[in-house]
Image (spheres, rainbow, N blue to C red):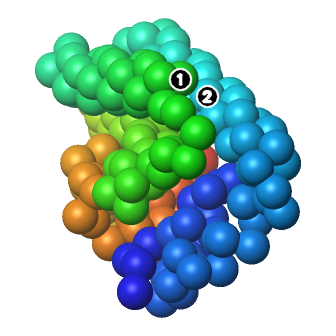
Amino acid sequence: MQEGEKTAGGMSYRTMNGNNVKNLMEYLKGSDENSSKEIFKKNKDYYIASANKTIARLKLAKKRVLYAKIEENCTEKIYDKISTSINWLNELKDKITSMTYRSELLKSNQYKKWHAVKLIPSAAEGVAISSLISREIADINDKGESSNRELLESARIHNKKAKSNFIKILNLSEQSNFKEAERLRTEGYDEAALAVKKIKF
């Protein structure tokens, strides 16, 4: 059985939780050598294009983090994670490009690592959002603009939980539980939204 998720994008059939599709994939490899070669080539093109899309998404997240102007140590950690991920994807593209007919394009652990990488942009942006919310809470507190300290403290608690979730997602690996990671991401954004609601009273 493969450990994985139903939310792994275009490669979802490779990582569906609890499904062993290895034998079924034989039916999608073509009916003869010519069709098999053509499918293999298109498969390579698809994965390279998908890797390029993921790289572009990582670069977008990096720009968003840059212009959020959050804490330097937090920014550096995110940049390092993004750079490492981009390097890994470029190496993966090179491997795929050099593969010959009948090779298995990706191993199970590579699909899982790619899934972890795909979660990095939204997690990085989540950290940026929660850092900016923290700054706003601190500004309100310093200026004495809030007459409701309970709401402000509630906002701080929700936002702290949001940031914690996003940082956990940034530290995923191919051994991680991706179902739990997806839950953490959704919960993180919900918690951040609740924090904003509390400070916009």
Q: Quadrant of the N terminus?
A: bottom left
- x, y percentage for residue 83? 32, 18
- x, y percentage for residue 123? 43, 44
The kind of residue on which mark 2 rests is: Ile
Characterize the local packing of mark 1: few (<14), some (14-19) or many (20 or more) Cα atoms within 10 angstroms.
some
Q: Is residue 121 above or below residue 182?
A: above
Of circles 2 and 1, the one toward us is 1
- What secondary structure is marked by label 2? helix
Q: Earlier in the sequence, mark 2 or mark 1?
A: 2
Characterize the local packing of mark 2: few (<14), some (14-19) or many (20 or more) Cα atoms within 10 angstroms.
some
Is residue 89 visible to us here?
A: no
**Residue denoted by label 1:** 97
Image side of residue 3 versus residue 196, left or right: left
Residue ID at (32%, 72%): 177
What distance separates the C-alpha of mark 2 from that of mark 1? 8 Å
Image side of residue 30 versus residue 196, left or right: right
74 or 197: which is nearer to us?
A: 74
Residue ID at (32%, 57%): 109
Which numbered tag is attached to residue 199? none
Q: Is residue 187 above or below residue 125?
A: below
Residue ID at (39%, 55%): 107
The kind of residue on which mark 1 rests is: Thr
156 or 99: which is nearer to us?
A: 99
**Marks 2 and 1: CB-CB under 8 Å?**
yes
Image side of residue 8 versus residue 155, left or right: right
**Residue denoted by label 2:** 48
- x, y percentage for residue 69? 38, 13
Q: Is residue 1 above or below residue 38?
A: below
132 or 54: which is nearer to us?
A: 54
